[in-house]
C-alpha cells in the first residue's frame, strides 16, 4: 500500500514567538494549498497556541516536542497529553535522543510516554537510533531492535498501527553527517522486517518510518526516494523557510 509521506519539523528550543510566527507565515505563503504529504510542525510549547490558530484549515498539522506521561499532578514545568489535546495538537515526539541524553529519559520512560500519548488521543512520533560507537561496532540493528522491543512492542496491533517511527542515528543529528540513502534504507528495512516478525505484514507495510539527521534541501530527495523512507524529521534545516519548503517539496 502507498504510505503518505510526512515531513516533520522539530524546532527544538529555537525562535521567539514573533520569529516563530514569521516562519509559519512564510511556510503558509510558500507552500501549495494542497499537499500530497503531511507537514507537521513541532515548535516549543510557548508557540503551540499561535501555531494552532495560524495553521487551522491548512494542511500543516501541529505537534509537541515533548509531554509528561502522567495525566496531571505535582510535576512542575511539565505538560500533559490532555493539555496538548485540548489545544488541538495532533502529534507528539517522544524518545528523541536529546531527551534521552540530556534529560535521562530511559526506554521505560519513553514507553510510558508512548502509552500516554496514545491514550490521550495524539499520535506519537517515536524516535530511535544508535550512537556512533554502536554503529562503529556494527551493533546498530541489535540496539534499535531493543529500543523497539522496550518502548513500543508491548502495544496491541490496533494501538501499534497508529504510531509514526523516526529513525534518527545520533551521529547524524545536528552534525551535518547525514546517513547515506543506503544506510537509511538498510535500517528502515530492518525496522520494517522486525515489525513484521513482531506483528504482521499489513502493519509493517502501513507504518510510516521517517529518517532524521541533518536532512537538508540538497539531500532530502535522495533520502526520500529510498523505498522504506516515508519522509523525515528535520531539526536545524526546518528553521529556514526556503530550505524547508524545498525539503517538503522533495517529499510531496
Ligand atoms: C532532530 O533533532 O530530530 C534532527 C533530525 O535534527 P537535525 O535535522 O538538525 O539533524
Image (cartoon, rainbow, N blue to C red):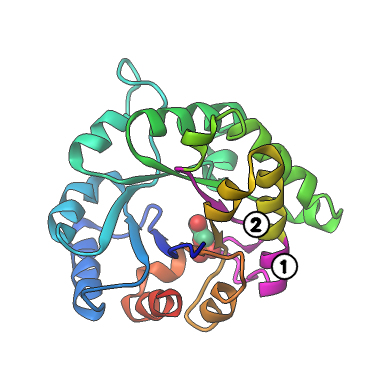
The quarter of the picture where the C terminus appears is bottom left
Report which residue position mark 1 lands on: 183
Q: CB at mark 2 closer than 8 A to ligand 1?
A: no
In this rendering, would 186 be left or right of 212? right
Q: Position of residue 225 (x, y in %)?
A: 57, 77
Residue 59 pos. (x, y %): 25, 64
Q: Is residue 79 visible in the rendered structure shown here?
A: no
Coordinates of residue 116 in the picture (x, y in percent): 41, 28
Q: Is residue 169 above or below residue 30?
A: above
Residue drawn at x 57%, y 39% is: 100
Q: Are marks 1 and 2 in contact (CB under 8 Å)?
A: yes
In-image side of 32 versus 193 (left or right): left
Residue identified by numbered label 2: 169
Residue at the outermost right position = 137
- C-alpha gap between disc 1 and disc 2: 10 Å
Q: Nearer the viewer, residue 202 or 26?
A: 202
Asked whether residue 112 is drawn in magenta, I would say no
Residue 27: % across, % down: 25, 73
Which span of residues is magenta-colored?
162-186
Q: Is residue 175 covered in magenta? A: yes
Amino acid at each position: 500500500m502507498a504510505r503518505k509521506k510526512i515531513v516533520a519539523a522539530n524546532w527544538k528550543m529555537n525562535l521567539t514567538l514573533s520569529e516563530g510566527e514569521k516562519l509559519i507565515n512564510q511556510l503558509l505563503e510558500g507552500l501549495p494549498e494542497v499537499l500530497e504529504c503531511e507537514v507537521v510542525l513541532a515548535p516549543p510549547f510557548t508557540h503551540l497556541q499561535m501555531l494552532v490558530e495560524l495553521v487551522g484549515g491548512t494542511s500543516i498539522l501541529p505537534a509537541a516536542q515533548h509531554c509528561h506521561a502522567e495525566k496531571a499532578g505535582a510535576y512542575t514545568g511539565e505538560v500533559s497529553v490532555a493539555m496538548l489535546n485540548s489545544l488541538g495538537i495532533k502529534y507528539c515526539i517522544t524518545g528523541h535522543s536529546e531527551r534521552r541524553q540530556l534529560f535521562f529519559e530511559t526506554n521505560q520512560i519513553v514507553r510510558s510516554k508512548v502509552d500516554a500519548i496514545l491514550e490521550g488521543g495524539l499520535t506519537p512520533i517515536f524516535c530511535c537510533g544508535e550512537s556512533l560507537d554502536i554503529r562503529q561496532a556494527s551493533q546498530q540493528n541489535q540496539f534499535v531492535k531493543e529500543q523497539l522491543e522496550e518502548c513500543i512492542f508491548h502495544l496491541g496491533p490496533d494501538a501499534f498501527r497508529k504510531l509514526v517511527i523516526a529513525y534518527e542515528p545520533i551521529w547524524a543529528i545536528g552534525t551535518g553527517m547525514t546517513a547515506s540513502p543506503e544506510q537509511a534504507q538498510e535500517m528502515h528495512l530492518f525496522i520494517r522486517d522486525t515489525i513484521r516478525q513482531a506483528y504482521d505484514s499489513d502493519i509493517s507495510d502501513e507504518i510510516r518510518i521517517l529518517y532524521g539527521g541533518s536532512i537538508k534541501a540538497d539531500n532530502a530527495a535522495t533520502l526520500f526516494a529510498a523505498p522504506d523512507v516515508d519522509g523525515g524529521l528535520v531539526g536545524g534545516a526546518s528553521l529556514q523557510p526556503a530550505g524547508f519548503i524545498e525539503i517538503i517539496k522533495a517529499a510531496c
